[in-house]
Image (cartoon, grey):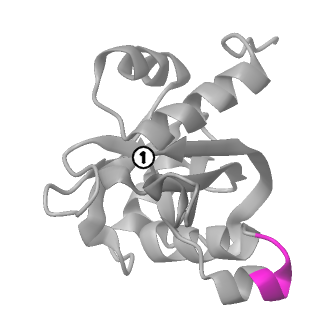
Amino acid sequence: RETTPPEEHFRVLTVNCLVKTTDERFALAFRSKGLSHFGDMLHVSAAGNIDLHAAIESRTPLVQCFVELQEELNVFPCDIKSIQQLGLAITLPRNSATMEVCHYAQVNLTSQELLERTKTAKDSWEGKVSTFSETETREMLETEKFMPTGAATLMLYFNIYGALSVRHS
């Protein structure tokens, strides 16, 4: 007899990545209405299901993060200045627990260069990518509808990196 609740029987492991450009803008995607989960909401710009065989072989979910960055933004490993795992977010869509490994990447592209690349990305149909300042992103987090794991990723980022960035001349 099964003693765990149904929502714990199967967990989907996913990955996402919050991207920041050289001109200090965050790339966020407004997800298409036709998506099966959380359509018509904002999310961080690259996300997807983890290929478990690849993750087991490489012993990290980071490989899938690179795949999603390429498929959704046309960002390649050579374009990435740094990448960091921020934490883990868990949601219960349709009573099936989903665990998302949340990442943050700084890319060696301006926001304009990044947006130009997204136009020809393989999975560009999944959502419209736009870039926002840190102030705009914080305001949107309080006022706009976000996919829960996207909001969690932003909160993890702001918790780790603290208050608004201050530049000294």
Seen at 37% across and 41% down, the residue is 147
Residue found at x 30% / y 16%: 143
Q: Is residue 113 above or below residue 71?
A: above
What x and y, as percent, mark residue 35? Answer: 22, 63
The answer to whether residue 18 shows anywhere in this view is yes
Indicate left or right for 9 with 160 as reference: left
The answer to whether residue 36 is left or right of residue 71 is: left
Q: Residue furthest right?
A: 59
On screen, residue 149 above or below 80: above
The amino acid sitting under disc 1 is Leu
Residue drawn at x 42%, y 22% is: 141
Q: Nearer the viewer, residue 15 or 6?
A: 6
Under circle 1, the secondary element is loop
According to the picture, the residue beneath numbered tag 1 turns out to be: 92
Q: State the extent of the magenta-drawn residues as a range.
A: 56-60
Residue sitting farthest toward the left: 33
| Residue 169 image position (x, y, % from top left) | 81, 12
Residue 84 versus residue 15: which sits nearer the camera? 15
Report which quarter residue 20 is drawn in: top right
| x and y, in percent, of residue 52 in the image | 65, 81
Task: Please identify the quarter of the rendering in which residue 43 is found.
Answer: top left
Residue 105: x, y in percent? 69, 51
Q: Quadrant of the N terminus?
A: bottom right
Question: What secondary structure prevails in the magenta region?
Answer: helix
Question: Could you tell whether 149 is left or right of 56 in the image?
Answer: left
Q: Is residue 85 inside the magenta stretch?
A: no
Q: Nearer the viewer, residue 15 or 45?
A: 15
Q: Residue at x 64, y 74 (%)?
A: 64
Q: Tally the numbered discs.
A: 1
Q: Is residue 158 above or below residue 10?
A: above
